Image: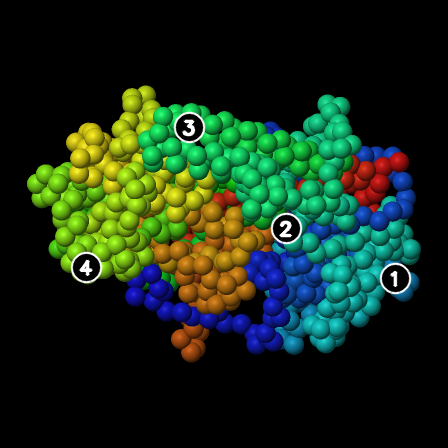
Amino acid sequence: MAGVPARSEQPAATRRPARRPTRARWTAALTVGLLLTPLLAGCGGDGDGDRSVFDDAAQSLATAERAGLREGGRATWAVDALPATLNAYHFETDEVTERIAAATLPMLHTLDGRGRPQLNPDYLRSAEVTATEPRQRVVYTLNPEATWSDGRPLDVADFVSQWKALRGEDRSYWSASAQGYDRIEEIAKGPEKHQVEVTFTRPTAEWRALFSPLYPAEVTGDPDVFNEGSRIELPLFAGPFQVQSIDQEEQSVVLARNERWWGDPALLDELVLTAVERGERGAALRDGSVDIAEVSPSEAARIDAAHTERADGEAADDGETGDGGAAADDGKGEGLGEGELTPPSGPSGPSPALDALHEMAVARLHRTPESEAADKRYAAAVVRADETRERTFATREEALREQLRNFTVHRAYHPSYTQLTLNGSSELLEDEQVRWAVARALDREKLASEVHGPAGLPTAPLGSHLRVVGQHEYEDTSEAAGEPGAPRSTELLDTVGWRLTADGDASAAPADDKATRDGLPTHRPLSLRLPTAQQRAGLLTQAANTLAASGEDASGETGDASGRENEGAVGASEGGDGADAEPSDGANGASGGGSSASAGTEGSPVAWRPAAEETRVTPVGAAAGAVATALGTGTGTGRDGSATASAPDGTVSAAFAASAAGSATAVADTSRSAANAAARPGAEEAEDGEARVRQLAEDAAREADALREATRAPVRAKDGEPLSLRFVMPDGADAEPLREVGQRIAAMLAAVGIGTEISEVPADEYFERHIASGNFDLALYSWPATSYPAVDTRPLFTKPVSIPGGQLLIEQNYARVGTDHIDQLLDRAAGALDEGEYHELLDDADARIWAAAGSLPLFQRPQLVAVHDDLAGVGAFGLATPRFQDIGFRR
């Protein structure tokens, strides 16, 4: 079936227990294969070269001299969820695990702001390559003061135990990866005291990535402790902090100062990591329960505004701070204003705006001299309501900002990147030229701008699979995927036989035979998944068709106007029920071609009823007319400045007013009566009314045609099969930004004739049941950045290998696209001890990965971290390893 992979193979893996479900499981699952990428180091040079605005956005911290900070205090840091384990090498590790490890365990090498490795003097006196022949040897000289929390010094036993647990030979260890440790041949005591000598089986350029963090032998020497015993506790620590408690009920991890720490003591008494939903973090900052939190762009903008007001000396009055309820309500409400549209005394109380709307509708329907005055009263009431609403909102917003004035937002690119993955095992994507066409159809600059712009970051589409923006030696090699743009994409698709038909459509949708036979307008349902412009075009088309049908009925096809009236009367008689007939379709019509006439006075909304067919059509036409008016095709001034037509007797404006008040019933009733008045025998200006209806229909049709031409998205086909790809995305509020990106990508692909079938799946099933199993054509997810890509990214791009049983060994290459050449280049880079050769090989490998077009990096998501102004040493770290002991409160 189109859009479904030709085969659904499971990645071969060691048998392990099922992972326990987590709230953000689909996100965490995407990071398990990389070894602590925000924390580990790779090779790098010393020179910065020319810095750019992108480099400056790589990190942003609240800075202060350590001497200007005081000891003591408790800071609370919001995280997504509690860690599944405290073992950073466990296959269930996540970002919070890594953060705790960096604060409590030895990090032999840390990263600076550009992702370069730095020797950590708290643990090492030196670390250097002492030989390259016949084997590479590295000697670590340990800081003699470095000890575990029980007083035992760090020694060779800890190194040996960790190597054996992670090298991949003992399958009883549930480790995430053996990368790097599988290149070690031997570990022994060094030639001098406090030294450890590591001998490698082959040259290893990224040796600095190893042993950061370093676990005590008490953890890595026992598979049971490694797998399960280290989930909620560790026997020993050797960092500025130690894990004091994990409270599942409070959803928090308390890190307390390690009194046995030999380095600069931690300034804070406690650093608390507490799980807070992203949508609740603004409230947590305002109520003081959180001091540090990554926030959304909208919340960041609010904090910026509050901080600017404070800097300018603008303080809110005490009466505007609001109470707790006002602070928690950051919306503008549903009404136009308190005491205006929404009655202050409840549903039965007076509402000036609604009262004025009612008076206006009655005046128009009865054509009284007060009609114009009623219009003015209603307009004035709406203005007053809007002013009240804005004042109310301003007061609430001021209260919210008042509570955020002591926070500052720090901005950086997040140390992870989002990519579009193309499943190369899919029938539709196994052809690399189709994958190239997808790659070239994407405007990655635009995608990045729509993510970075609202966050206040420079737009930076990611041009590398192996490094991120601002990282040392970052190079954009995306040109290897070919010249981007719709023309290049369409040329490729034409070349390989995916073509549009002569009329620009790959397949014609069948018409509704019954509707066509009956001469009725065909109304296709509008899908919320369609782009907004296409929905708008569809609605206008419906308006045109319906109003045209209404206009034909009103024009008197049966002869003169009196014939229409007689036809209605006869219909009522034939219906058998006359004035007492019950409507059969929910309106005031009758079945069997008859209609019911309701008693009433001339000019009343129920004084006259049209034939059944007119009753069915007119309400839809009125509602569509109201929409057309709102879009500039009804009463008033058109987009080109010219006057536009309206339905007779103010039908459109009355319906639009009712629609603005949110009353669909009023739209139907008011428009039905006005349209009836236009078609009623003897009605004044009947012919003029009919012309106006037709004019409105024509205007709507022209608008719809223009929009349809701009938004039409025919799908290409080949041998009768459409080029429609299954685009899988996770559901849930947390994944909403990802789905928005997916919708933009779908629109870009539609422009070149590639269809997408967007499928939202449960977030907790997204990764295992779809990405890992290959049940997708297109998918979006993120990988953490790494400072040693030759080893760390190897599983992501390795060529899939067939294994017995008909499966593919794909490791973490979920695109299932790879080449021997890419594998060879990464292997050579991993062993290149010359730094220049190392970077050249990585750039070459990256270009080849782009050319394979299995994974397309898009951008790094924003890292927006709100920090209380009393704190320093924390913020948006980017690639850098936090120095937790320097986080503290200002004096």
How many neighbours does mark 2 have within 10 angstroms: few (below 14), some (14-19), or many (20 or more)?
Answer: some
Residue 436 screen position, x and y as percent: 35, 48
Q: Residue at x 43, y 65 (%)?
A: 774
Mark found first going from the N terminus, 2 or 1 = 1
Q: Which residue is mark 4?
A: 575
* The residue positioned farthest toward the left in the image shown: 559
Camera-nearest label, 4 or 2: 4
Q: Position of residue 266 (x, y in %)?
A: 86, 48
If the image is split into quadrants, where does the N terminus sit?
bottom left
Q: Are marks 1 and 4 in contact (CB under 8 Å)?
A: no
| Residue 697 drawn above or below residue 34 | above
- As rendered, which of 565 and 711 lies closer to the eye? 565
What is the spatial separation of the Cα atoms under label 3 and label 1, in whole angstroms? 80 Å
Residue 121 in the image, given as x and y percentages of width and height: 81, 47
Between discs 4 and 3, the one toward the N terminus: 3
Q: Nearer the viewer, mark 4 or mark 3?
A: 4
Dot 3 falls on a residue whose secondary structure is helix
How far, Cα to Cα, is label 1 from label 4?
94 Å
Numbered tag placed on residue 149 in the rendering: 1
Q: Which residue is mark 3?
A: 375
Residue type at the position of mark 1: Ser
Q: Quick one: SS at disc 1?
A: loop
Q: State the separation of the CA atoms marked 4 and 3.
A: 40 Å
Residue positioned 45% across, 67% down in the render: 773
Element under disc 4:
helix
